[in-house]
Image (cartoon, coloured by chain):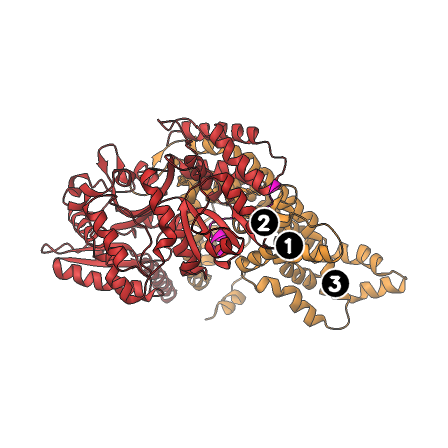
Chain colours: A orange, B red
Amino acid sequence: MTVTEERVRRPPTRGTTDRRSPRKRGALQRAVGRNLTAYGFLCGALICFALFSWYPMFREIVLSFQQNNFVDPGRWVGFDNFRTVIADPAFAAAWLNTAAFSGLALVIGYAVPFVLAVVLNELKHAKAYLRFVVYLPVMLPPAVAVLLFKWFYDPGAGLFNQALDAVHLPPLSWLDSTSTALVSLVIVSTWMNLGTGTLIYLAALQSIPGELYESAELDGAGLFKRVRHVTIPQTKLILLVMLLLQIVATMQVFIEPYLLTGGGPENATVTVAYLMYQYAFNFGDFGGGSALGLMLMIVLMVFSAIYLRVSREAER
Amino acid sequence: MTTRRRGLSLLLVMGLGLVTASCGSDDQKSAGETDGKVTITVGCMPPKSNPKEREAWEADVAAFQQAHPNITVEGKDAFPCINPDTFQAKLAGGTQEDVFYVYYTDVRKIIEKKQAADISQYVGSVGKVKDLRQDVMSVFKDGEKTYGLPRNNYNMGLVYNRKLFTQAGLDPANPPKTWDEVRAAAKKIAALGPGYVGFGEYSAGNTGGWHFAAELYARGGSMTSEDGKTAAFNSPEGKAVLETLQKMRWEDNSMGSKQLLQWEDLMRMMGGGKLGMMIGAPDVVQSVNNDFKGKFEDYGVAAVPESEGKSSLSGGDGYMFNPKASAEKIKAGLLWLEFHELTPGQGQFNYQRAKTQGRPVGLPIPDLYGNSAPGNEINTLRKQHATVPVDNFTPYVEAQGNITNKLEPPKAQELYAVLDVAMSAVLTRKDADIGKLLSDAESKANKILAKNT
């Protein structure tokens, strides 16, 4: 008997049954029994998650309250690791930079893929080709993309300053100045993630019924009015979900400061994830690194909870 | 239903089996200590991508095992030999080698965290230990206890491009001895045209702080007080380090416009042939030759500027022992290290074989023994089989008699991270206030040093 046949034959259990009722327990057993095969198939994924996501997360929580040399059993030190990292002068800078990076990424990077998606959606020709071109940066390994920008940003022979020079503008310091370093990293990050965002928005735009646009056009609405009165209201939830996803992703920024600036100049690009790396791998202080990781995890969990709630709204 | 449950159990068992298989440690495999036989795992075996060195290693293992039939040496290859990202993970996962490779920088931290075995009671069996330079051996000591043995050592000098010196009208046989001379030479090299950098300097990823320490030591300064409890770099010497760099960057324009450089950047620039000078040891020339398309004959090494009669930051690498290694493994490991790393004419000092293989011979490192019988023997062999222009390193070698090797400070990486800020400030901001930068760095460093490890 297949699962589908079983589902057809058995009426779904009513959720209104009293908790203590044996009928309820039986129903639960039946529900579990019915899905046993599915659970079996889930097993592999669950083991992978348990080993590579949940266990490390649990270990991080444990390590953040321990001093551990990975030889002897860890020594419980209460909140000492948290006190240590909070007292670090780079701690405040790291959180401020991370928040600034996320904020700048919203200002610079959040609207760009949406605008691109709208433009691509309006195009009549070469749509597939342009979609491929937009998605191309995503196919590059992040390290390659970042190192490519290292050359773009070179103050002497870099592409960007050459371009500025060509239009008779003064060169910029890009990564080598406290005022432009973080913005430069945001540009890299935006470029790397542009394709994914654009494709998601494009999919959302293509699911908007064409009649709405036709009605708007009949009423004499131009492109901007159509976007304002049809596109944005219809994609509101996707925009919100993407906003939250972007906050969660950008707050974990690591590879850009690690490869491009080493946290400099003058700690202007030290982020929480980068400081966490410094503690764990350069200072050999896994307790401090885990404490930072736990703090970041708590902040991200808040945004993730909001995201899940919004996602549920979106599904309704 | 029963069938389904059985299926589920089977899936679970298979999944767990796979997991167990993938997580199995090789403790059983390497723990072979039966019938007086012992197997040791040793780190830093040259990778297959480095065929000549690998061939030499394998020949050495065969020779060693013939001399010691009860010992099996299992080399573990990796490039680079140590990766800070995986060091702790290997310890936690039980896959750390019995005899593992370390940089001097990490030794103090490893000893403090009790992540290496105390080999004091066994090290006496290594005859060569008594001849090793005290400053080199002190790296692996904590009080009376010994935790490892050196493989390589060097101290910082001035690496320079002889070809560019000639192009700029400078005498490559007479490299700069003071910072004023470095400034003058850097200006001339930078004047060769766009893209030419007279003097390159690090300022990111902790490498800036590392070079700050090297330049401070050379001027006679110290990173910390004698007891290591307070910072000592906010001093006239520390100020001079930053002032000189600031002048070279902004007044002389001889340091290039691109800053926030990290380890590989200067190597690449040196290999590219447009960088005139940098602070570094002779091993820099080796890296530039091996990995960054430079040629031995184009580079020279001199003593670090202002170092006459002063100190130079020393560095190097060596081996320590897994804290869980048995006495038998430690004894076997020491025999291997004595054979492969410490014996003139054998292992790493088998210069005759290196020459036959076409590998570079003649760099003035390692200098593990100083002016002692094994040290002189190694120098003689080195000269006899030299394949690189030894004269290019003469200024460095001649200065060694006057220079005291000075080890890195306690909490080195943390202090370097703090001083990256000062280094990046003077190299990226024309109006950087050196006094404020140093006092800020000092207060941060004092907090770090006061922190109980």
How far from the left and from the top, in percent, is residue A189?
Answer: 61, 53
User: Which one is nearer the viewer's eye here, B448 or B437?
Assistant: B437
Q: Which circle marks residue A208 in the picture?
A: 3
Q: CA distance from mark 2 to mark 3?
A: 49 Å
What amino acid is found at the position of numbered circle 2 in the picture? Lys
Q: Secondary structure at mark 2?
A: loop
Please give the chain letter of the residue carrying mark 1. Answer: A
- What's the distance in space between the residues labelled 1 and 3, CA to CA? 26 Å
Foreground: disc 2 or disc 1:
2
Identified by mark 3, the residue type is Ile
N-term mark: 1 or 3: 1
Residue receiving disc 1: A190
Q: Nearer the viewer, residue B31 or B17?
A: B31
Using a 10 Å C-alpha cutoff, classify the residue at mark 1 as few (fewer than 14 neighbours), some (14 to 19) or many (20 or more).
Answer: many
Asked if residue B190 shows in the view, the reply is yes
Point 44% across, 31% down: residue? B448
- The numbered disc on residue A89 is none
Q: Is residue B407 above or below residue A236?
A: above
Residue at coordinates 53% horizontally, 39% vertically from top-left? Answer: B423
Quadrant of image for the N terminus of chain A: bottom left
Name the amino acid type tagged 1.
Answer: Thr
Tell me the residue that label 2 is attached to: B258
Give the residue at x 41% y 46%.
B302
Residue B414 placement, left or right of A177: left
**B174 shown above or below A64:** below
Q: Quadrant of the C terminus of chain A?
A: bottom right
